Image: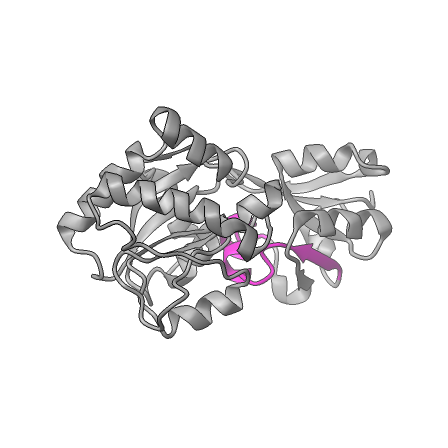
Amino acid sequence: MRARILVALAFWLTSTALVAAPHDVAIHVTRLGGDRGSAQPYVDRLLRRLEGLAGWTAGSAKGAFVVSKKEALAYLGQAAPGFGMLEPALYFELRKSHALTPLAQVESADLVSPKLHVVVKDPALKTLADLKGKRLWTTLGETPRYLGRVVLEGKLDLAAVQVKPIGQALKGVRGVLRGDCDATTLDDDQLEKARAMTGGADLLVLASSPALPAIPVVAFGAALSDAERAGLVKALLALCDGADGAAICKEMHIGRFVPIDATALKAAETRYGE
């Protein structure tokens, strides 16, 4: 059920029109998965609360789930959602082409990875340079610039590595333990769980990232007016308050929405580059 609920946080998109309305939302997170149909009731409950807090017409915000980056980019090539909640990697990739403006960010022990580690099993691998010609399975495989510059700080030439995109971190753990790949990327929580698996005690951390930015909530271009943006930010910051809000956020595995940490985001933007 947890995975089914969290699909809602993989990508909310409009399902009835090619051109989205300003109150439609695109959300993309990758740490947990699920399926679109099971998630929809949870998505709808959150949207109804958001509408009430923002003073929007009931039913004016719509959302649906699209699982892959490829589908997300295809949709965004046709439609214009007013706002979204995006993984940092996709935010950096789209921030200029889609004129993204950060409005708030997500606090969540389940969804946010504040740090990532490059994990191996072979003790002969001692530095990132030793991965040259090796196989790296990672959930960031579809966003190599973010992986190489923001996570790895430019210390590994990914062109010299066999990078394979994977949908779930567990696949990378199993790949390393079975010898199907040489390295994978895990956050603190994933690494702790991996070390509890059979053979997991042999896992080694080859390198660790600096602090990584949280998942931002962003405005797309000028779809929302200044007043609507201000109302949206106010609504997001209050969304998880009270018994009803806390219950809705809990089932979505959101801790709360907080103001953007501009310092952390700027540090990552500097590493990512123009």
What is the x, y in percent for residue 98?
A: 32, 65
Residue 142 forms part of the magenta stretch: yes
Is residue 233 visible to us here?
no
What is the x, y in percent for residue 198?
A: 85, 37
Q: Is residue 55 left or right of residue 163?
A: left
What is the x, y in percent for residue 71?
A: 50, 68
Say which residue appears at 37% left-offset and 31% top-offset: 245
What is the x, y in percent for residue 267?
A: 39, 44
The correct choice, above or below, for 249 with respect to 226 in the image is above
The correct choice, above or below, for 272 with respect to 254 in the image is below
Say which residue appears at 27% left-offset and 63% top-offset: 21
Q: Quadrant of the N terminus?
A: top right
The correct choice, above or below, for 250 with respect to 34 in the image is above
Question: Could you say which is closer to the camera, residue 115 or residue 238?
Answer: 238
Quarter of the image for residue 35 reads bottom right
Q: Quadrant of the C terminus?
A: bottom left
Specify the color scheme. Answer: one colour
Is residue 84 visible to us here?
yes
Q: What range of the chain is rendered magenta?
A: 134-155
Which residue sits furthest top? 243
Q: Is residue 256 left or right of residue 170?
A: left
Say which residue appears at 41% left-offset and 60% top-offset: 13
Q: Is residue 121 left or right of residue 107?
A: right
The correct choice, above or below, for 244 with respect to 207 in the image is above
Q: How many discs appear?
A: 0
Residue 10 forms part of the magenta stretch: no
Question: Could you say which is closer to the camera, residue 22 or residue 271?
Answer: 22
